[in-house]
Image (tube, rainbow, N blue to C red):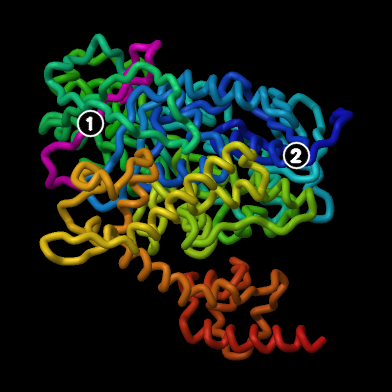
Amino acid sequence: MYWEYPEQYDVIVIGGGHAGCEAALASARMGCKTLLLSMSLDTIAKMSCNPAIGGTAKGHMVREIDALGGEMGVVADLTAIQFRMLNDTKGPAVWAPRCQSDRVAYQFEMRHRLEKQENLFLKQCSAQDLKIKNGVIQGVFTKEGIAYLGKTVILCSGTFMRGLIHIGEKNLEGGRAGDPPSNGLSATLQNHGLEIGRLKTGTPPRIHSRSIDFSLTEEQPGMDNVKFSFDTENIPRLPQVPCYITYTTAETKKIIQENIHRSPMYSGKIQSIGPRYCPSIEDKIIRFSDKERHQIFLEPEGLQTEEYYVNGVSSSLPFDVQLEFIRSVPALRNAEITRVAYAIEYDYVLSGQISNALETHAVKGLFLAGQINGTTGYEEAASQGLISGINAALKVQGKETFTLSRSEAYIGVMIDDLITKGVDEPYRMFTSRAEYRLLLRQDNADLRLREKGYQLGLIDEERYQKFLKKKTIIEEETKRLQSSHKQVNGKGVTLAQLLCHPKKTYQSLMEEYPEDFFDHGPEINFQLEMLKYAGYIERQAIEVKKLSHTENVRIPADFDYARVVGLRAEAQQKLGRLKPKNLGQASRIPGVSPADIIVLMVVLNKHAKQKSIA
């Protein structure tokens, strides 16, 4: 029996990880009475793995979250202890901000922002079951015997659903080290028609700083003038500290090879698939046996702790082997491991069971966000949390869903991939996944998405007016640079053409021609420098326009593919299961051929004509 809590909520968010935080904040800011349930309020926004935010493509997503009105970027800026801009020697499309975070400071800052948010209520409870009637979500049942009623529910379970931790021959139930798993929700989802699978991820050991010989490492300093949020200006930064680089050795390789049979990954204990692009040290040694050494990053966990995160050696080997291979690294000969590395298996919902809005097809009003959808990474989770929170609020308000296309945001690329391409290993975002990455740079996320955030009610008037001012200056200055001419070496050229010279930058031209190139601040100056790539950007924009017609051909949610004559059986099956929102999305589903798309287009056009006549 459950006692029914006397208040009803518009949105209930299960899980206080990075997805849950963004989901709860978004729905509450959009005016919905929101409840966030967490097993422990002390672990809200906890960085279970690496204490870092951003990186290649991930940094783009954090800036998109910020542009839409999410919180991750602001909190990252306030609690970072080192900033870097990755790939800054390459083209601007792949530049990516990253920061090393103070783990505890990030967690506390985010939690405090949740606590202060109007319309948002936090409660420490363990979700055990979902209340579902006639295929519609109605609320949540907790282990504490309480029933919370809600119009929508967002499930952000992370690695907690039937989580199983592996350390060598030992395994124990847990959502992460020190926290119990959630064992009831998987069965509930299955009982209501959702298919469940298993994935695996892992984490490296942590070591005490006094046991590191830093003289045998390479220091990696941070950079100035890097940030995530478009709104954090002149904020006091935490003291900045370096990270360090070292390498495994031939001895490391030998130790792991001799003990590989003790790894559950190779003994057969772990059957699920781990992230290909973040392999364990066992995987690196076996898969890349020709390499004599592998890079290790020693990253501080925070300013108030002496623990270091040993990035690059996640492992599920027994503790005695971990200690031996860690100490085979010269800089770590006396390493004192404070937290053992482990692998963890957990349940996720197989692809093809959610819409672009992240709502499940099987249960109306139930949304999924984060690792439950097969992704890995804080940034991927937070992005989904934001989109699910927005759409849960819009559903309650009776408004149309909010989605982002592949040409609008990396967030759109990720969600489209999850729906059309499916997941058989933990999904991680890379710039290579985006076909329009020159349009989706990290520097222009606000120009792409801030208007949308304002329309949703997530960007306040003050920030919006600041954005409009910036946008106006960029537009006016772009026109001026493209139309103003100057005599250079006896030839008339536009100011924009001067920018196209490979050895010229906006900064160098400000110094050379101060009467023509004005200092508008680093953000606007950078946007004007992008005139160098105007031709390439225009070409990508034309490609987007050419392909947009397929994205505009909508497919009804109840469309019966089995009745389409000429559509192959495989296409019927996949389209019926994945339920693409439009023809463009249908064309990206593996197993759906161009011929299937032509047949489908003819039928949809005929269907649209009949509907217009009726």
Label 1 residue SS: strand
Q: At 58% across and 61% down in the image, what residue appears?
A: 352
Q: Is residue 315 above or below residue 364?
A: above
Q: In this view, does 339 lie above or below 493?
A: above
Looking at the picture, tell me which residue is in the foreground, 311 or 264: 311
Asked if residue 296 lies in the magenta stretch, the reply is: yes
Stretch in magenta: 286-309
Q: At 31% across and 67% down in the image, what residue appears?
A: 535
Checking the image for residue 296, the label placed there is 1
Query: x%, y% of residue 590?
Result: 46, 71
Measure the C-alpha gap from mark 2 to mark 1: 46 Å
Q: In this view, does 210 lie above or below 432?
A: above
Q: At 46% across and 24% down in the image, what residue appears?
A: 78
Q: Is residue 539 above or below residue 234?
A: below
Label 2 residue SS: loop
* Badge 2 vs badge 1, beta-carbon distance below 8 Å: no
Quadrant holding the C terminus: bottom right
Q: Please state which amino acid type lies under the numbered disc 2.
A: Gly
Can residue 33 be seen?
Answer: yes
Can residue 321 be seen?
Answer: no
Q: Please state which amino acid type lies under the numbered disc 1.
A: Ile
Query: x%, y% of residue 411?
Result: 50, 52
Query: x%, y% of residue 432?
Result: 34, 57
Horizontal side of 363 relative to 484 (left or right) equals right
Horizontal side of 159 relative to 434 (left or right) equals right
Residue hosting label 2? 31
